[in-house]
Image (cartoon, rainbow, N blue to C red):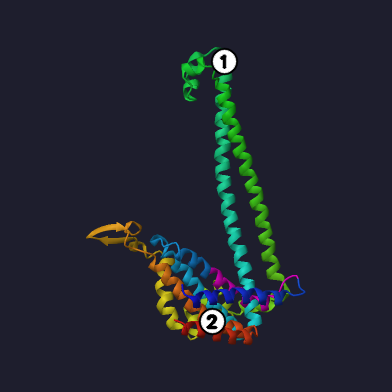
Amino acid sequence: MNKQDEYLLTFTNKIVKDIYEELTEGKDEPEIQKVMPLLLFKTMLDKIHAIKILAVTNESRVGESTFSIARTICECKWYFLYMIKSDTDFKARAYYYFSRLNEAKSRIASLKFTVSECRYYLAKRKQSLKNLQEKIDLYDKAIKENDLDTLGMLHHGQGLSPLDLLAGKRITDVFNSKKEIINTSIVNLETQIVNANKNKREYEKRIAHLKSNPDFEDIRVEVANIPDRPDKMKRLKRYPTWYGLKTHISNVRELANHLGLLNEYQSSYGSYSQDIHILNATKQIRLKEDKAVLKDEDEASNNDEALEAYSFSMTVLSSVVRDFLTHYGKDVQREALEKNMAKLYNEK
């Protein structure tokens, strides 16, 4: 982590805040089409910050986890470049539309699962309460009829020994304690169901609003215009993406190729994909003196992966920062950055 990297991070973090303040000056919130490229760029900075924290820990076991973050940073770069390349207004609003829409759909699916799980456990708790009540009724009947065999069975079933009874422990206290615990669990589960359904309705309203908002009518038209053909368009038709509108780019690889960055996709980004798809588990074992040991137990291992991810991410940032500054009309700041970065490189 050299002086150039530290300077670049300090500079970009500050300029992002400055531009955001300019965009929000006199407004409650900035316009979507103007702020969205900024937010993509800021996401890159936040991800780099996360890698930096993991890199300085010098723990070998966290290293490869940074590859998936570095992969996301690369995607942010492509999204940003694609967004500012042309038709920025439409692309920025499309990104916002799909982001909010997909978030709502994902949250609804998660909340449905929560309700399903809560109902499952609620049914079990209610059955447990019913079973407990049957034991209480059986106990009351046994007391009334002086049925010692049943009383003994119930005491044993509740884990009460003769010594416990002599010590003053009563089965009714055990029943009441269990009943209270079950009732509390039932109330909590019912509350979770009510809250989850309430939140689900809010996300459903968001979806309805997005799909009826006239500000996004042109986006909905483009979604409808995706060809329904038995090729790659079939998946795009079913799962449309913001960058697939108009151009019909169907995946990230095609997006990188569209930007002339296919080599970047096929190199580091491709290798980092192993972490995303959990194809790197074998790397957790290393050979030490012909013996297989866990990676974090090998004292000779270090955090090379995280340092690699950090270096790659800084390279990605360096390659796109000038486009960012140019897009927001910060030519003076861009020239100052280039001058200061060159000066730092010459001081090596």
Residue 189: image location, x then y, percent? 61, 43
| Residue at image coords 63%, 47% | 192
Vertical placement of residue 311 versus 347, above or below: above
Instruction: Answer above or below: position of 347 versus 127.
Output: below
In the rendered image, the vertical position of residue 151 relative to residue 120, given as above or below:
above
Q: Nearer the viewer, residue 6 or 174?
A: 6
Instruction: Please identify the quarter of the rendering in which residue 29 is found.
Output: bottom right
Q: Can you tell which of label 1 and label 2 is closer to the viewer? A: 2
Q: Which residues are magenta?
A: 28-47
Question: What residue would you read off at disc 1?
Answer: 143
Residue drawn at 51 percent across, 16 percent down: 167
Chief SS of the magenta region: helix
User: Which residue is nearer to you in this view: 64 or 169?
Assistant: 64
Mark 1 residue element:
helix
Check disc 2 and report its element: helix, strand or loop.
helix
- Look at 55% across and 48% down and name the residue there: 117
Q: Which mark is residue 259?
A: none
Q: Residue at x 55, y 78 (%)?
A: 79
Q: Toward which corner of the image does residue 173 lie, by quadrant?
A: top right
Residue ranking furthest to the top: 146
Residue type at numbered disc 1: Ile
Q: Do labels 1 and 2 touch, CB within 8 Å?
A: no
| Disc 2: which residue | 320
